[in-house]
Image (cartoon, helix red, strand yellow):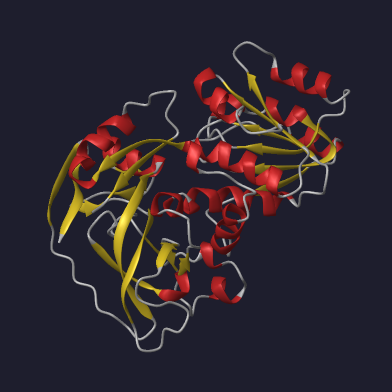
Amino acid sequence: MKALVLESAKKLSLRDFPVTESMGPYDVKIKIKACGICGSDVHYYVEGAIGDFIVNEPMILGHEAAGFVIEKGERVTSLNTGDLVCMEPGVPDMQSPEVLEGNYHLDPDITFWATPPVHGCLRETVVHPARFCFKLPQGMSAAEGAMMEPLATGIEAAKKAKIRPGDVALVVGCGTIGIMVAISALAGGCSKVFISDVKQEKLDIAGTYENIVPVNSKKENLIDFIMKETGGKGCDRVFEASGSPHVYPDFFKCTKRGGKVVLVGMMNGLVQMNIPWIQVHGLSIETLFRYTNTFDRAVALVNAGKIDVKRLISRTFSFEEAVQAYEYAAAGYPEVVKVMIELP
């Protein structure tokens, strides 16, 4: 079938690619209609690797997608042909101890789209377990459905933070995930969310959401700003979503005593943390890696009008323009949040 193939670093082609997938009794076959470009996709395209995950042979990209069910296995009862669904891209080994402990995202043998050597979903059709497919309500587009994957990360961060009604939060980093964390924190009960970055264009987009307050940390001292705005207390919940080592360890000082910090952004290398200061201020720290059981929540929140993801789709390309779409996404335009590819 036709697919967007990463041949090697900085070399993409849209071509016929042999894919062999068998349908099991609990699987569905999906005709892909929309697929977003994630930061990890761009990393693989530009560098050919992310940490220990190295692209050693041609690989299909894409893991944020939605499409129509065109075939279903004999044991599938939750979906029907014609249903528009979004898909959770990671399928764990259901026999792993991590699954039994409720941490299926930590399964070391999880099969995750577009993570070498697993092919992604930027192709005509995919076969996927129905258990990891989520029906989209009438009126929701395939492009919105493809946004459920990054939104799932934001909702997972809000879950980790154990937000209480009325909490005030800070999100450090205003990329796609940072904005998803901010809007998820609001949906989870925060009364106000500050979001910081050095790119004003990204902050302007985040600022279109009610009760999100953008802070340009190139122009403002973030700690002084937060302390002034919170009466010297700091924020109840702080999320690090930039993945930049340069924000460490200072952003911790934006947290109130007894507050909670969630580390969302991932990076290479080591960072400094002032452990005695963290202990004296009674901070608790949570880490985040992907998500568990959040896709249905993402769909429900968007359907209820609690979260709007449409405004974060900056530009849409056709499937025939997929190579250009990746070139555009890799250019790093500051006003761009999400680049979407739509298939016929």
| Quadrant of the rendered image containing residue 186 | top right
Q: Position of residue 142 (x, y in %)?
A: 39, 54
| For residue 230, side relative to residue 28 (left or right) | right
154, 211: nearer the viewer: 211
Q: Tell me which residue sits at (62%, 17%) in the image.
A: 217
251, 154: nearer the viewer: 154
Q: Is residue 128 above or below residue 67?
A: below
Q: Tell me which residue sits at (37%, 26%) in the image.
A: 332
Q: Position of residue 4 (x, y in %)?
A: 20, 49
Q: Is residue 3 above or below residue 78?
A: above
Q: Tell me which residue sits at (54%, 18%) in the image.
A: 200
Q: Position of residue 30 (x, y in %)?
A: 31, 68
Q: Position of residue 38 (x, y in %)?
A: 39, 43
Q: Is residue 210 above or below residue 151?
A: above
Q: Is residue 238 above or below residue 157?
A: above
Q: Quadrant of the N terminus?
A: bottom left
Exactly how many numbered labels are in the figure?
0
Q: Quadrant of the C terminus?
A: bottom left
Q: Residue furthest top?
A: 219
Q: Residue furthest front?
A: 139
Q: Is residue 317 visible?
A: yes
| For residue 24, side relative to residue 153 (left or right) | left
